[in-house]
Image (tube, grey):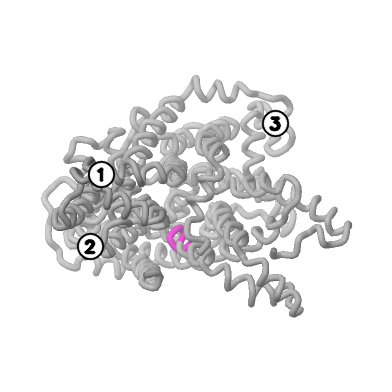
Amino acid sequence: MFPRPIQSLSPTAQRAYKIALPVMLILWLLPLLGVAMTSVRPSSDLAAGNYFGWPSALAFDNYLTVFKNTALDKYLLNSFKVTIPTVIGAVGLSCLTGFALAIYKFRANHLLFFMFVAGNFVPFQILMVPVRDLTVSLGLYNSISGLALFHIAFQTGFCTLFMRNFIKGLPFDLIEVARVEGVTEWQIFRHVVMPLMRPAIAALSVLVFTFIWNDYFWAMVLTTGADTQPITAGLNSLNGQWIAAWNLVSAGSILAALPPVLMFFAMQRHFIAGLTLGAVK
Amino acid sequence: MVPSTAKHTLTPRKRRSRQSLAPWLFLAPGFAMFLVYVIIPVFQSMWVSFFEWDGLSPKIWIGLGNYVELFDDEAFYTSLKNNVIWLALYMLAVPAGLMIALFLNQTVRGIRIYKSLFFFPFVISQVVVGLIFSWFYAPDFGLFYKLIEWITGSQVAILADENLVTYGIIIAGLWPQIAYCMILYLTGLNAVAPDQIEAARLDGAKGMKMLWYVVLPQLRPATFIALVVTVIGALRSFDLVSIMTSGGPYGSSRVLSYYMYEQALSEYGYRMGYGAAIAVVLFAIMMIFISGFIWKMWRDEKGAR
C-alpha cells in the first residue's frame, strides 16, 4: 500500500492524521457549507450584513418561499421529465450497440466504435447550429422531447463505449456454447448477455442521470421559459430575478443539487465504478 | 444428439449469414440517432461556416469570409488566449487530485465517507458551483473577497477585474475537476500491486522516489483518463463563464465556446455562420487532442488481441 499505512507510524502521527482529515474536509467543502448555511438564513441577517456568520435563526421557510414565489417546482419537474427518458433511452440503445460492437467481428467494427468514442468528445458548439435547426424543423424546439431526443443521441456515444468494454470482459465461451445449442442471436442478447449486464446498466444509469440533470448548455439552446426549461437554466434566470437575495439563491441551489447528490449516495459504488472505468488495467 | 435441439440447429452457412446481419440490426437504432444528432451536424457546421446566415433568411455564400473576419477579431483572440489559460491551469487538477488521493488512501475508520464527501463537488451542477463561487467572490462581503483583503490589504473584486476574472472562474472549475481526478487516482491506487511496493521498500525506496519510480508508472491508466477528462473539461468550459460573468467584464472572460454561443444565439445577434466558424476552430483544437487519445486507444486495442 502506498503511502505507508498510518497505523505503522507513531501514535502522534496517527492522531495528527485523524485531526487533519475533518479539518481538510471542512476546508474543501467550505463553499458548500456556506451555501447550506445561507439557505436557512433569515433575510434580516443579510440586511444586517451577517453573510457568513452563524444564522441568527433557522429560516426553513426560505425553501417554502422559493417554491411559492417562483416556478422552481416546474423547473424541477422538467428536469425529471428530460432526465428519466434520457437515461432509459441512452442506456437501452447502448445495450444494443455495445453488444454488437463487443460480440461480432466485422470489418467496420473498429471504425464505428471509434466514431462513437470521438463523437463523444466533440465540443458542443460544433453541434449547436445544426441540432437547433433540426429540432426546430421537427417542430420540437422548446419542448421537453426535443431536448431529451438530443440527449439520448449524444449520450449513446459514451454509453456505447462503456457497454462495449463491459461486454468484452464477459466470458465469450457462454455465447459460443449458446450458438452451438442453436440459440438465436437475439435470444443470446436477451437471455445470456443481458442478465450479466446489470452492474453496467446500474453504473451507466446513475452517470447519465447526473450528466443530464446537470446539463446547462443544451437547456439554454433548445428550450426557453419555465414550461420546458430544466432546473439548471431555471436557476440562471431566477438568479437574475433574486438580485442579492442570496438566501433564496442558496435554497434554490441546494434543491437543484439534491437529486444527483442523493442518487450518488444511493448508488455510490456503481457511480464510481462507472466514472473510473479504465482507470485500472 | 437429442432430437429437440437438432430441430433448432442451423446449417453452418445459415448461421454465418445470421451472424453477419445481426450486428447491423443491433447497431441500427443507436447508430442512426448518433449519426443524425452528432456525426452529421459536425459536417453541417463546417458547411454553415462558409455562409453568412441569421438562421432565418436564405444563406449567402461568402467562402472563407467568416474565417478572414476571425483573423482580425480581437474578441476572438481574447477567447483563444483564455482557452489556453484554461487548458494550462486546468492541468493542475491532475497533480492536485493525486495529492488528495494519496492523503485519503488509508484505512482508518470512516475513511469511505471521507472519500465520498471529498468527491461531492463533482456531483453538483456547474451552475450551482458557479453561483456558489460568485457569491464567495462578491465584493464587500464575499468570504474570498474578505480573505484577500485580510491577506493583501487591498480590495479586489475578482469577477469585475479584467486581468483576474478568468483565473477566478478557473478556480471555481478546478474544484469539481480535482474531485474527479482524485476519484480516478483513488481507484488506481487500490489496484497498485502491494508486493512491488513492499519489494521497493525493502530496497530502501520511499517518499517521492517511491511515488515517482514505483507508484506513478502503475497509475498510468488513471493518469491517462485524468488527462483526457481534464483537457476536454477545459475546452468545454461554458457553464461557469455563462453563470459567473456572461463573458464580462467587457468580454474579458470569454472563451471560444462562450463567444460562439454569444455570436450565434444571444441578444448580440444571430450570426450562425460566424458562430459556426468559431466552433470549427474550437473543434480543430479539440481534434488535436482527440486524435491523440484515439490513437492511443487504438494501439491498446490492437495490443489486446
Residue type marked 1: Val
Q: Look at 17% across and 52% down and name the residue there.
A: B18
Quarter of the figure with residue B171: bottom right
Left or right: A101 as drawn, with respect to A52: left
Q: Which residue is mark 2?
A: A106
Q: Position of residue A114 (x, y in %)?
A: 31, 62
Q: Which residue is mark 3?
A: A48
Residue type marked 2: Phe
Q: Position of residue A252 (x, y in %)?
A: 53, 32
Left or right: A190 as drawn, with respect to A275: left
Q: Chain of mark 3?
A: A
What secondary structure is found at the residue carrying circle 1? Answer: loop
What secondary structure is found at the residue carrying circle 2? Answer: loop
Q: Compare marks 3 and 2 and give the one earlier in the sequence.
A: 3
Labels 1 and 3 share a subunit: no
Q: Which residue is mark 1?
A: B2
Measured along the vertical axis of the image, is residue A31 above or below residue B218? above
Q: Nearer the viewer, residue A239 or A171?
A: A171
Labels 2 and 1 share a subunit: no
Quarter of the figure with residue A142: top left
- Evaluate if marks 1 and 3 touch, with contact meaning CB atoms under 8 Å apart: no
Mark 3 Cα-neighbour bin, 10 Å: few <14, some 14–19, many ≥20: few
Q: Which residues are magenta?
A: B229-233
Mark 1 Cα-neighbour bin, 10 Å: few <14, some 14–19, many ≥20: few
Q: Chain of mark 2?
A: A
Labels 3 and 2 share a subunit: yes
Majority SS type along the magenta span = helix
- Mark 1 vs mark 3: in front: 1
Q: Look at 38% across and 51% down and name the residue there.
A: A163
Q: CA distance from mark 3 to mark 2?
A: 70 Å
Q: Nearer the viewer, residue A33 or A175?
A: A175
